[in-house]
Image (tube, grey):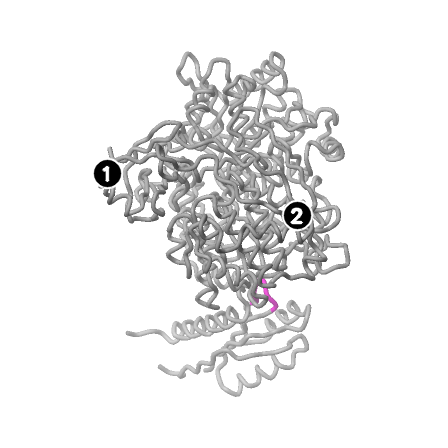
Amino acid sequence: MYSSLSNRRDFIKKMAVLSAMTAAATMFPGILFAEEQEKNLPKGGNLDWKKAPCRFCGVGCGVLVGVENGKAIAVKGDPKSSVNKGLCCVKGYHSVMAMYGKDRLTKPLVKKNGAYVETSMEEALDLIASKMKETIKDHGKDAVSIYGSGQWTIPDGYVASKLFKGCIGTNNVEANARLCMATAVTGFLTSFGLDEPMGCYEDIDHADVFVLWGNNMAEMHPVLFSRLLDQRLKRGVKIIDFATRTTRTSMAADKSILFIPQTDLAVANAICYEIINKGWVNTAFVNKHCNFSKGLTNMGYGLEDNYKFSDKPEKIDFETYKKFLEDYTPEKVEKMSGVSAKDIKYMAAYYGDPNKKVMSFWCMGPNQHSRGTWMNNLIYNIHLLTGKISTPGNSPFSLTGQPSACGTVREVGTLTHKLPHGVVMNKEHREFAAKIWDVPVENIPSKPTYHTVEMFRALDRGDIKFMWIQVTNPMVTMPKLKRYRDGAKKEGRFIVVSDIYPTPTTDIADVILPSAMWIEREGMYGNSERRTQYFEQMIDPPGEAISDTWQLVEVAKRMGYEKQFYYKKETHIEEIYNEYRRHHEGKKHNMAPLEVLKTQPGAMWPYVDGKSTKWRFNSKYDPACTNGEDFHFYGKPDGKAIIWQRPYEPAAESPDSEYPYWLCTGRVVEHWHTGSMTRRIPVLHKAMPHGYVELNPGDAKRLQIRTGDKVKLTTRRGDIVLPASVNERGVPAPMQVFVPFFDENMLINDITLDSFCPISKEPDYKKCAVKVEKV
Amino acid sequence: MPIKSYLAHPHDNQKHVLIAALSALDHCEVIPAENKDILIVVTDTETKIEEDNLKEKMEALSSLKLLAMVSGFDTPKNK
């Protein structure tokens, strides 16, 4: 075949560049040659490529969105993003299609005589404002509430908090991150005094061993998992999957270890026992940087209305802690956990080896756990005992699920007890927020009100009369759902839902507001590694849809808060972000200026002197360390992290003779949470069209159940019929079943239990007792 | 007609100086790493003598700490 000399030279030149890039990548893991990598991407005709963080999960991949004639038509990974380095997962590549479903909400709808009637946005916003004022007048400030999301942009959450906490004067602000990340928050706060991971994704390029604690990364964080696999190819790293069910992650791991649900508490303690017993404690680190504490036990499970719990930490010494761990020898724990003493020692040996850098990843397994805060503490204990923390490759890393669970819910503080900086219980924090918000400090109540489960209980009881729900679908996701659905439909409740498609949650609404989605408006998300990322408005939203931020601003103005909501429509996102940054000023949490976020794929806070901070609490990398030592856990008054004595306690509900199986729920790679967006993307819907129940092949054989057969699941809350899945994607352990929750036509949460971690108030979606029958 | 690629390591805080100096040389293409202090340099010259001269000029740059060749190709002139 003929090839011109110039083509041949171009080809050879590319080969030369490629060779150099390969050589550089061997020497410098994670190195980026963004411009060159971009040059090699296929060019679309008149496409205008603009950067954004992905709309879906908490990994925060950088994507480039191709826009043509006012429509987003293509997505590719942003090679300049250090998060995903040009890769995307199946959801990311199809993300723009989520904006173009046929039944997109385009007009406000108001329920009149049982039917939805189209109205103008102005009228709908007037109605919401007047209804809120009327409810406050008749029933008090705590009768109105807002329930948001880790998919809220930073400005959405910020104006919601300012309106409700600062202006109206109620702490009835919650978000769905209570259902997924609240435990991570209380884990961080109890162990370190400050929220969010100390490390970053770059740890992946340095670690030798990865321990995944109940974390199906291959499906839930596929791009990050591909980085682990890449490191295994390059450097032979080890991946250990520690879980209750065999998944794609287990199959790709070097070792899969299964444990009986809830006994991860015991196994983590056994690893600590082994580390101490074998003399692998980093004594110098522990002596200098750690304290030991214990808290209350037998806390209950929050199953009753108005349940309250406050831990009472008590300092202990190392010897007391060591004595406590004698109940958790690997041999004793083997009997309760189903994990062999050999496998416990295998994991402990990696953590204990001073020559191995270890990264622990976890997400919903330890977080949606009735003792979730304890589980988070226990993983930190392992890293603190060995001093494997806050250094490149040594990193306990709590992954988040939503694109801005960290950025909005945790950093802006859209939970009942939180403020953008600090907590409502602290007078100084209230004064600080009130000053920036330009409201009297007395406006901000000093007591938290309802966490999410209790907020929906209050709606059911009638203590809350008005609820505004934005960017989330609680009528699919709430545990023990039937109670909360029935409660929301009761007479005298007024529900506003802002969303982009009809969902089971819009079904309970009195007013439905059409929202602008993702790049149809301007905003920012904050991902798992403290990275704040900006996106501009690239296309127009359909019909009368407007952003959730502007919906809130308009209602706030109608309620008489024009002074606090002074923002101009054209520049409101910039004004809000600049105001928000003031809450975090200082070396511990400074946020990057907007102009920086506009020019690069995000920046990690604390952003100090023009630089992101990659490893917090390590004086080599973190300018906030001031104690003159190599590490400074400055979230605690004495600068020391806490190693917690936390025992094993059983789940709220365990299998018995009547309900002999464990029920675990979760997600699938194709669908984003409740599927309201991804089920409208034909290729994803076809790939995973409906819910199912996974059974262990041995159980299925005994019950004479084959894939596709109808199976009835019954718990103390009700029953549901689902098609069986045997030996397909995941394989539960014997006497366990797994059901994904994305399918609104098969609402598994109708039968789950609303027990929660008493410290974080996050429900345990992973454990309840269920009966399994072939229909 | 040699085509060669190199990894060029700048002295501390000299990355931008080195990029500018290398970019100013004829027959020399520079691809800086986004996040590390290293550059890829590709040279595309007519003759071996020209290539040697260029390499000499590169090595004389004060901002350069180390120049390591990664690959070298020599394409025939007429084919």
Taking the magenta stretch, the answer to whether it contains residue A133 is no
Say the numbered circle drawn on residue A477: none
The chain carrying label 2 is A
**Which image quadrant is residue B74 in?**
bottom left
Out of A435 and A313, give the one closest to the viewer. Answer: A313
Residue named by callout 1:
A709
Q: Residues within 10 Å of mark 2 (few under 14, many from 20)?
A: many
Out of A686 and A177, give the one closest to the viewer. Answer: A177
From the viewer's perspective, tell me whether residue A546 is left or right of residue A743.
right
- Judge whether A20 appears above or below A282 on screen: below
Marks 2 and 1 share the same chain? yes
Is residue A709 at least partly visible in the picture?
yes
- Residue A548 in percent (x, y) is at 54, 31
Q: Quadrant of the N terminus of chain A?
A: bottom left
The chain carrying label 1 is A
Q: What amino acid type should be assigned to the residue bearing mark 2?
A: Phe
Q: Residues within 10 Å of mark 1 (few under 14, many from 20)?
A: some
The residue range painted magenta reads B32-37
Q: Secondary structure at mark 2?
A: helix
How far apart are the alpha carbons under marks 2 and 1? 49 Å
- Residue A622 in percent (x, y) is at 69, 56
Main SS type for the magenta part? loop
Q: Quadrant of the C terminus of chain A?
A: top left
The residue under the point 44% across, 57% down is: A226
Residue named by callout 2:
A192
- Residue A103 in percent (x, y) is at 37, 30
- Judge whether A455 appears above or below B33 on screen: above
The residue under the point 62% across, 45% down is: A188
Taking the magenta stretch, the answer to whether it contains residue B34 is yes
From the viewer's perspective, tell me whether residue A406 is left or right of residue A489.
right
- Judge whether A418 appears above or below A378 on screen: above
Q: What amino acid type should be assigned to the residue bearing mark 1?
A: Asp
